[in-house]
Image: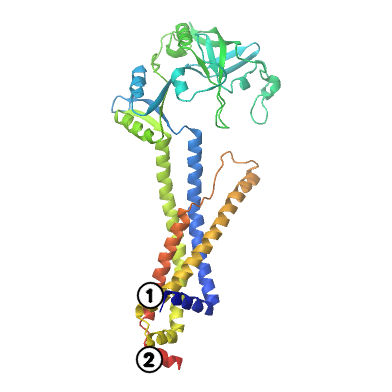
Amino acid sequence: MKLKDQFRFVRQNMQKNRTRVFMTILATAMGCAFLIVLASVGFGLQKSVVKEITERRVITQIDVHGQEINEQGGFRPLDEKDVHKFEKLKDVKAVTRRKMLQQGSTYSIGNYQEPTETFVANFPSEVKAGFELSKGRLPKSKDEIVIGYNFPLNLALKDAPDDMFDEKGKINAEYRYTGHLIGEKIELTVMQFKEGKQVEKIIPLTVVGISKKPTKVWAEDRSVFISDQTLKEIEDFTGTPKGYILDANSEVPKDLNVHENSYDDVKIYAKNMEAVQSISDQLTKKKYATYSVVNELKEVNMVFLIAKAGLIFIGTIAILIASIGIYNTMTMAVTERAPDIGIMKAIGASPKTIKRIFLLESSYIGLIGAFIGTIVSYGISFAVNFAIPLIIKQAFGQETEMNITFSEIPLVLPIICVVICFGVTILSGYRPAQRATKVDVLKAMRREV
């Protein structure tokens, strides 16, 4: 009996019991759809989390926070020697280092002012790492500064009322500085307690550049970059490293844990993403505390791998339940077709051929069910991603800030489902197929008569 004839025989037999076969296919399709949709939640949330992580940070960036110096977990801050070591590592594109002014600094121009963070940066390394300006140029003298892109938008009137912010938390135009800042003089005010009294020092500076707009919509850059000479002037006034403010009742510095020549923010930029792990491993061996997106992604992917495996396992239970229907359908098919089996044996059909016919039929049912279930699951996935954000918006009255994908069906998921379904249907149909090969020819023919 040719394979083509076997397929035709299978289709004819399935058409004889359309209702029963349809219900079996329906159960299989429901099981497959359940598996795919359930697992797609894991894939969707993983995609959203990974996207959020990669958009929030530069993939080739490695943050270095210090070096372990004892078994108790003590760390020392990083200095210029460490930076030179990092720059000599293979596949390092740039090493940026910043010192942070250890007090809240206020900048003012005319009747407008803004409190913000102040840094000292090494601009040659910043440019190598991708730092760009939207306006102006980089500083050339000690009294020149670069301000963040969002700094002008937060420069507000000194006596502005409490309701100067709009619904989005931004300063209304009527209270905001609207003039040009490039080339303008701006005053930095720093303070210190001396003899129990607060004293202030005003340092005149000139704005020469504005940084490029942040690539992230939600990000704000209000930082101000001053020179090393300006920082030294602040330290001479405060009498402390990096302008640290002392206790108002004491002139004697406590254990400040602030090191004059140390850096507060050191970042290594690799030439490509593949080099990040290698550089991180080298630094870890030398007991440097590091963090990179690659390390975070590795942990996130491991967590979601376990979660997806669990969801697929739960979904497989639904297919196993559907396999009971396939077993029942095939068992009844063997009983009903006993005369046909007897005739096939009588004209010379081998037990192997008979077994193959019934396995083909159970496989047909499983594959058709998997195909239908896959199509349905894609429809459900689309509906979930469309409907849930609307439901959240209606329930909470606002849209989610994070663009979450609740369901994602990659190609590998339907393939896994089809493989599981095919395997389960083969197992379900094997026993009835084996039973069909043992049908007695004489008894089957007598029943036909």
Quadrant in the picture for residue 357: bottom left
Q: Which of these two is toward me, 396 or 95? A: 95
**Above or below, 271 relative to 393:** above
Left or right of residue 107, residue 32 in this image: left
Left or right of residue 164, residue 247 in this image: left
| Residue shown at 45% from the left, 11% from the top | 228
Query: Extreme right residue here?
Result: 174
Q: On the rendered image, what quadrant is the C terminus found in? A: bottom left
Question: Circle 2 — which element?
Answer: helix
Residue 137 seen in this snapshot? yes
Q: Which mark is residue 8?
A: none
Give the image's coloring scheme. Answer: rainbow
Question: Circle 1 — which element?
Answer: helix
Q: What's the amino acid at mark 1?
A: Arg
Name the front one of labels 1 and 2.
2
Question: Residue 112: percent from the left, percent from the top?
Answer: 64, 14
Quadrant in the picture for residue 288: top left
On the image, numbered disc 1 is attached to which residue? 431
Q: What's the amino acid at mark 2?
A: Leu
Q: On the rendered image, what quadrant is the N terminus found in? A: bottom left
- Characterize the local packing of mark 2: few (<14), some (14-19) or many (20 or more) Cα atoms within 10 angstroms: few
Question: Residue 154: percent from the left, percent from the top?
Answer: 62, 21
On the image, numbered disc 2 is attached to which residue? 442
**Above or below, 299 relative to 96:** below
- Characterize the local packing of mark 1: few (<14), some (14-19) or many (20 or more) Cα atoms within 10 angstroms: some
| Residue shown at 47% from the left, 76% from the top | 10
**Above or below, 30 relative to 359:** above
Q: How many marks?
A: 2
Residue 99 seen in this snapshot? no
First-in-chain label (1 vs 2): 1
Q: Which of these two is toward me, 234 or 238? A: 234
Q: Which of these two is toward me, 112 or 227? A: 227
